[in-house]
Amino acid sequence: MRSTYILVAVGDPVIHPEATHIAAATGHGVIDTIDPREITRLLPRAHAVLADADTAGHVATLDRRPGIYFLAADPGPVDWRAALTCHAENAYVLPAQAAELLTALGHARAPQPGQETRPTAGSTALARSGHAAPAAGQAGGTLIAVCGAVGGAGTSTLAAALARTVARHHPVTLIDADSHSGGLDLLLGLEDTPGARWPDLRLGEGTVAGTDLRAALPTTSDGIAVLSAARSTLADPFRLGPEHMRPVLEALGGSPGITVVDLPAHGPVTETVTGTCDRLALLIPAEVRAAAAAAGLVADLVRGRTATIGIARHRGWSGLTIDDLSRITRCQIIGELGQLSRLPRTVELGGLPDRLPGPLGATARLIAEDAGVAL
């Protein structure tokens, strides 16, 4: 038997037997307790820690360390607030995700004696996703919203492309601000990836670190953490509102990194985001009706002092030039995006490609650089 142990601090009688069985299967010793005094004594030296809703509150008061995993009973839902509070690297429902938990325990690395117990570069899902460390001295995050003047402009694709471009250089979170959308996780191939969706988050008025929030979200191989709507064949009472969006933006804004929001043109959630964002990129089809709609949006954004830039979108029947759009909308147009004839089929079959089409990547870089994001 290995010399280190796994601390099983699970009070739920439904999942406790499964948790101890999985811990034993790793070949490590197992110490099973829910006594707060024992958890305090044993947690720093454990190879890994299994906690649940009963013990997460106490674990959260102790020194932060890697190798904490939050457990819930199948079929869930996972109490993501409790998981984030106790600094869990991931959350699993048992017994459905027993194999995934066993794999995670196999890769866990216990803190060495005298080692700083805060998560290291390899200890969180955020760091494992592979993006570079933020620049020294970067105190908070940057929030960029992408909005379409009208439907069908390609807003979600541009938002995802912006996130993909930025992810090569910074931690990035992509947020779907429309609870009725098809789901940005689908656009990025994450529809089957475990992690929190909007209905799972109950942040309330508490404080959650942005890095912990990102670690709870499904993440692409190139480091884009995605917060999107959930899909179900059943009626879902959840409706995304400002009370859900506000604490998420506060958490992400307090940590280094870039947040990209795919934003609908109107609604209370839109007002919440536009009142907070550092830059809003408005995608405007070069058509008369779209330009008229954009003019109204720009007037509202200027009134609210939202820093706004425009991208001209050519959809095949464009009748206006950049000068026309600038004059009609009174918005600074910093670039234009033409037809991407092969992209719709590519996205439909396999999601947004890792290698972006040249014009799309160039437009994404323009937006990022205008917002002051170093690439």
Image: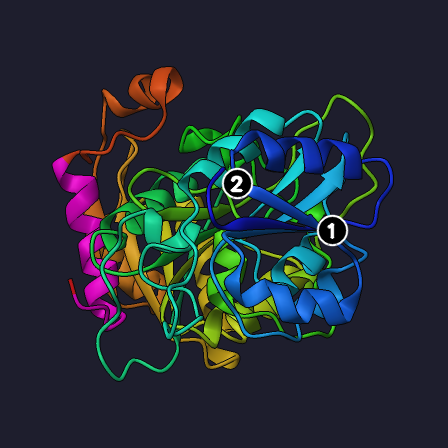
Quarter of the figure with the C terminus = bottom left
Among numbered discs 2 and 1, the one appearing first in the sequence: 2
Q: Is residue 112 left or right of residue 234?
A: left
Residue 52, which numbered label?
1
Question: Which corner quadrant of the image does residue 246 belong to?
Answer: bottom right
Residue at 60% over, 46% down: 178
The picture places residue 351, in percent across and down from the top left corner, at 36, 26
The picture places residue 65, in percent across and down from the top left corner, at 49, 65
Q: Is residue 238 visible?
A: yes
Secondary element at image label 2? loop
The chosen color scheme is rainbow
Note whether 2 is above or below 274 in the view shown: above
Question: Which corner quadrant of the image does residue 183 belong to?
Answer: top right
Q: Residues within 10 Å of mark 2 (few under 14, many from 20)?
A: many
The Cα–Cα distance between marks 2 and 1, rounded to whole angstroms, is 20 Å
Question: Which corner quadrant of the image does residue 171 belong to?
Answer: bottom left
Secondary structure of the magenta portion, mostly?
Answer: helix
Q: Which of the two marks, 2 or 1, is nearer to us in this view?
A: 2
In contact (CB < 8 Å): disc 2 and disc 1: no
Residue at 72% over, 44% down: 78
Q: Is residue 283 left or right of residue 248?
A: left
Dot 1 amino acid type = Asp
Q: Which residues are magenta?
A: 358-374
**Magenta highlight on residue 277:** no
The picture places residue 90, in percent across and down from the top left corner, at 55, 47
Q: Which residue is at the front of the view, 210 or 300?
A: 210
Residue at 54% over, 59% down: 213
Dot 2 amino acid type = His
Q: Which residue is at the front of the view, 290 or 335?
A: 335
Residue that numbered label 2 is attached to: 28
